[in-house]
Amino acid sequence: MSSKSKALPKGISGAEFDKVVRELRAIVGDEHVMVDEEKLSAYRKIMMPVPDAEHELSASVTPDGVEQIQRIMKVANKYRVPLYPISTGKNIGYGSAAPVQRGQIVMDLRRMNRIIEVDPELCTALVEPGVTYQQLYDYLQEHKLPLWFSCPAPSAIAGPVGNMIDRGIGYTPYGEHFMFSCGMEVVLANGDVLRTGMGAMPNSNTWQVFKWGYGPTLDGMFTQSNYGVVTKMGMWLMPAPPDFRPFCIQYPDEADITKIVEALRPLRIAMVIPNAVVIAHTLWEAPCTPVKRADYFTGPGAIPDEAVKKIQADHNIGAWNVYAGLYGTKETNDANWKIIESVAAATGGKIITQEQSKGSQALEYRFDLMKGKPNLGEFGLYNWRGGGGSIWFAPVSQAKGAETLKQMQMAKTILGKYGFDYVGEFVVGWRDMHHVIDLLYDRSDETQMKNAYACYDELLHTFAKEGYGMYRANTAFAEKVAATYGPVKRDVEKRLKKALDPNNILAPGRCGISL
Amino acid sequence: MNRRGFLKGVAGGGALGAVPLAALAQSDETGGGAGAVMVVAQAELPQARAIASGLATELGVRPVAAARRELGSFAGVTALLERAGRGRVVGVMDDASALIFQQIAAARGAGLVMDTYRRVGAASLVAFAINT
């Protein structure tokens, strides 16, 4: 009986929930509404330092299209039962597939997995939320289309719609995913279907080529929010360049981050280096090499700097490892390569080319991501500490050396205080850096769970005091992160929520937005 | 910790509460499996191979040793799941491989029956069972 569900939605009785389940089953079919514990287990698995029960779902429903979603919204409104939409559910480290609040019904959009269109002349694609990057990659290969997309590290199993909606990033010149999306279709809480940008106009053929439309551009509202369910997304694909030249530049000291950033920033802004450059610390590289932490340190607390230096020496890993690429013709890349060589020489960096990188797992998976080839190389991070605990702490900094050094030192100090390692990297946008830190801990160890929560909390508030905001956050800290952005923004978000979803049925609590 | 102790721990520490060891081999009542059980161990980890070997012996099957590269690739895990068909897969591997395996299996509609983390010396191992 579904009323025996472990976690009923707030304010819903067991009897009412049974009715909800029956009505949902009438829409999508029995097999696409799940209440059994075993079937829900995949949605339940989290890596955050909070009890599983806080993000327990009551059921899952898997619609096959817009029409079914509209009917589901009617049921949700009727009973005021909250839905938590997911696309591929691979927001690993940010909450995975579990709902933001206990008792929500996960609306899994994986059956909506059509690649609706790829236009090889305009280099655009229109996809549904259940499409994975692997699926899109296979499609492009099968159709022999020389087009690349940008994907995040979980690539093969994650999807472009979900990643763009959370404003995730990748490593090609199209690495700022929301920027390179174009046009969405959104089912609103009242069942209306909105197409953003030029898609609002009937018979438009510019939906995937012109982002803005007329009047206010609404796309951003549906990212990192709970104002609607995105059911289609346009994305821009990059023509495969005639010559792709990835490289890594290694630097020996942590303090080198200042000169690295000062040297790279003008190259990024001028687009000499066009892709989202990664500057990875030793401890991000090491697990992906792979290096076993236990071979270097088994004591309590954070791994000491001496052990980190030994890892660098033993495995030819820099204190910082800069991943970038040239994308162009042989002639343009030859010219720009001279700039790269002179910058590396002037800053004390050691260049590793693609030819020189053969056999290196860490370099191979990075170089593949830089050309949009899905792989799962970065999952090696989860072997660093073991125990299934991981939350991403992801503040933004200016692309200035002094700022990145300051943030790195702040983070390392706080992490060390709680016994955790600085497993971090900077991803260079154009004028910004996404500073991404994987707070890795053993989730089966109660002390580490408590410390991980306290550590993230201290990181969040310490950084906020310095004016450093998060670019993205896990669901356990959604409310706290939202609070750091001030009351005016939150009030506007709440008013928008009231207008678009007065019954608060869409993911209440996501990014701190609720009624 | 010896192998039998670990097996007992794996069986008893599942997400769904105490699960008898024999239950690792049973298909569910809805016919979620044809009774087939596949035991997969990460080839490079002697502890994983030993545990899987013991499990497989008790379940009357031959264990499958899968290399880290295979377990770390979408194609590799998909091939293993295709080979498993409809039934149960019991895996013993490192954290990264287990996460990848479970995520790919979940995307195909598999249910996670149990999932447990154990330290074996300095190594962290995950033992899990899924219904494919």
Image: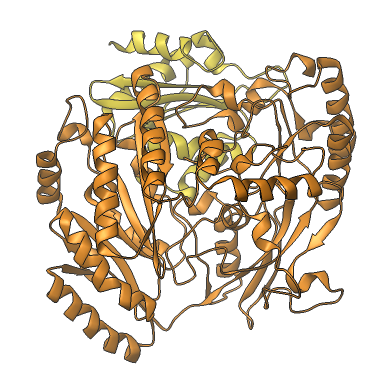
Chain colours: A orange, B yellow
The answer to which of A27 and A480 lies nearer the viewer is A480
Say which residue appears at 82% left-offset and 22% top-offset.
Answer: A17
Name the image quarter holding residue A42.
top right
Most extreme residue toward the front is: A488
Q: Position of residue A315 (x, y in %)?
A: 15, 50
- Which residue is found at the position 47% from the left and 17% from the top? B60
- Estimate the x, y position of residue A45 in percent, counting from the top left: 54, 29
Which quadrant would the C terminus of chain A be assigned to in this image?
Answer: top right
Q: Residue at x 68, y 17 (%)?
A: A6
Where does the image place residue A431, in percent across and percent down from the top left? 40, 69
In the image, residue B84 lies at what x, y percent?
55, 34
On screen, residue A171 above or below B81: below
Q: How many marks?
A: 0
Q: Quadrant of the N terminus of chain A?
A: top right
Which residue is nearer to you in this view: A347 or A417? A417
Please say whether residue A64 is visible from this viewpoint: no
